[in-house]
């Protein structure tokens, strides 16, 4: 399979600072027809009343997280239906969230890639971001453990700690075709 045969939706997950936005943007440019569906951009469409991930009140944060997933799923499905590979950039924290996204994308092919440079690398990258792009988060070790336990057997757990963003994007495009779709 070649890069132009990568179809459907590729959900690119990982902890804050893993490189999801950078890598999906670069990977999309390597494909003949691709769209980047960024969870952060979808969340930012809420111009009044937005409650961030882990924000307060917690029930509203969960509700808006669900809304974001529904909107990302609809966008990705539309792109796939019109012949684009959708590269979805979001934190998939657990199996329930992955199941929700797969349900929204069914029956389209979905693959999951977790960028995993390690908690220390993600902490450093997040801490050195522009303050407007920084995500205040201190649950790296727990999130890493949860994601490995619930998703590790369903995805490509991609250690990117020694790769540049361009190298990561090229390998993602080249090697994701080897993954069996979840759907």
Image (tube, rainbow, N blue to C red):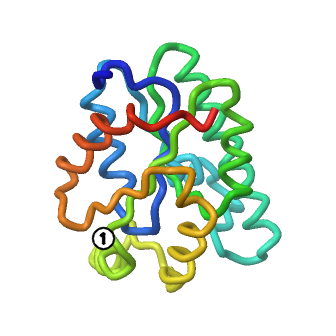
Number of disc labels: 1
Above or below 60: residue 123: below
* Residue at point 27%, 77% (across, down): 128
Q: From the viewer's perspective, is 163 left or right of 50?
A: left
* Residue at point 29%, 73% (across, down): 125
> Which residue lies under the disc numbered 1?
130
Residue 4 picture location, percent across and down: 31, 19
Crowd tier of the residue under label 1, counting other residues whose Cα lies within 10 Å: few below 14, some 14–19, many 20 or above: few
Residue farthest along the top direction in this orientation: 82
Residue 146 picture location, percent across and down: 60, 73
Above or below 21: residue 135: below
Q: Quadrant of residue 178?
A: top left
Q: From the viewer's perspective, is 80 left or right of 67?
A: left
Residue 59 picture location, percent across and down: 82, 70
Does dot 1 land on a helix, a strand or a loop?
Answer: loop
Residue farthest along the right direction in this orientation: 59
Q: From the viewer's perspective, is 57 left or right of 118?
A: right
Above or below 153: residue 88: above
* Residue at point 27%, 34% (across, down): 174
* Residue at point 60%, 69% (across, down): 149
């Amino acid at each position: 399979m070649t890069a132009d045969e990568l179809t459907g939706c590729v959900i690119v997950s990982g902890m804050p600072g893993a490189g999801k936005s950078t890598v999906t943007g670069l990977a999309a440019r390597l494909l003949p027809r691709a769209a980047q569906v960024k969870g952060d951009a979808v969340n930012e469409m809420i111009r009044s009343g937005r409650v961030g991930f882990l924000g307060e009140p917690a029930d509203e944060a969960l509700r808006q997280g669900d809304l974001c997933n529904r909107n990302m799923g609809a966008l990705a499905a539309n792109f796939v239906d019109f012949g684009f590979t959708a590269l979805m950039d979001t934190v998939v924290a657990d199996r329930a969230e992955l199941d929700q996204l797969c349900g929204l994308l069914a029956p389209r092919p979905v693959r999951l890639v977790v960028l995993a440079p390690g908690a220390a690398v993600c902490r450093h990258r997040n801490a050195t971001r522009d303050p407007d792009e920084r995500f205040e988060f201190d649950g790296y070790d727990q999130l890493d453990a949860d994601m490995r336990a619930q998703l590790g057997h369903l995805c490509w757990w991609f250690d990117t700690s020694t790769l540049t963003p361009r190298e990561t994007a090229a390998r993602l495009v080249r090697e994701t075709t080897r993954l069996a779709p979840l759907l």
